[in-house]
Image (spheres, rainbow, N blue to C red):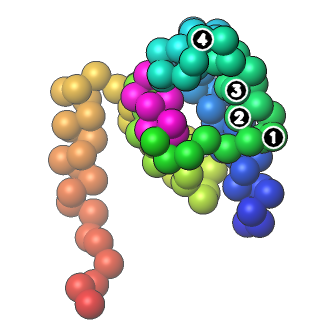
Amino acid sequence: MSGREIAYSWGRRLKQARLAAGLSQRQLGIQAGIDEAVASTRINRYELDIHQPDVRIAHALARVLGVSAAFFYAAEEELAEYIFRLAQLRAAERRDTYRSLAHIPGPPAA
């Protein structure tokens, strides 16, 4: 995946999570700590991939949206979708999911 494709995924994923949360661009920006006067414009530019936020802002956006920041950066679409869906689960469902994943063998130790 090229750098441009990853950037495109970032903005698309931000918009997906924002719409799922039922927030306007302005609301999201303000809740993430972006100055009220430019909140809508900044979120719009992130979603259009004109700019990409620094890591601190990305984490603030993720917190407001109730997703892991890993959702924005996942290289594979399928992994991003799993991360997004996991965040939508209730705490008990997440624990059950984590327990079931713990039974899957991981990579061999180095």
Residue 64 quadrant: top left
Which numbered dot is residue 42? Answer: 3
- Of label 1 and label 3, which has the lower sequence position? 3
**Is label 4 or label 1 in front?**
4
Q: Is residue 63 magenta?
A: yes
Badge 1 marks a residue whose secondary structure is loop
Residue highlighted by disc 4: 36
Badge 4 marks a residue whose secondary structure is loop
Residue type highlighted by circle 4: Glu
Q: Is residue 2 visible?
A: yes
Q: Categorize mark 1 by other alpha carbons within 10 Å: few (<14), some (14-19), many (20+).
A: few
**Is label 2 or label 4 in front?**
4
- Of label 3 and label 4, which has the lower sequence position? 4
**Is label 3 or label 4 in front?**
4
Which numbered dot is residue 50? Answer: 1
Which numbered dot is residue 63? Answer: none
The stretch in magenta equals 57-64
- Of label 2 and label 4, which has the lower sequence position? 4
- Is residue 60 shown above or below 76? above
Q: Is residue 80 visible?
A: no
Give the residue drawn at x 34%, y 26%. 89
Residue type highlighted by circle 2: Tyr
Badge 3 marks a residue whose secondary structure is helix
Residue type highlighted by circle 3: Arg
Q: Nearer the viewer, residue 103 or 66?
A: 66
* Position of residue 109 in the picture relative to residue 70 (left or right): left
Residue highlighted by disc 2: 46
How far is disc 3 from disc 4 in space, using C-alphas?
10 Å
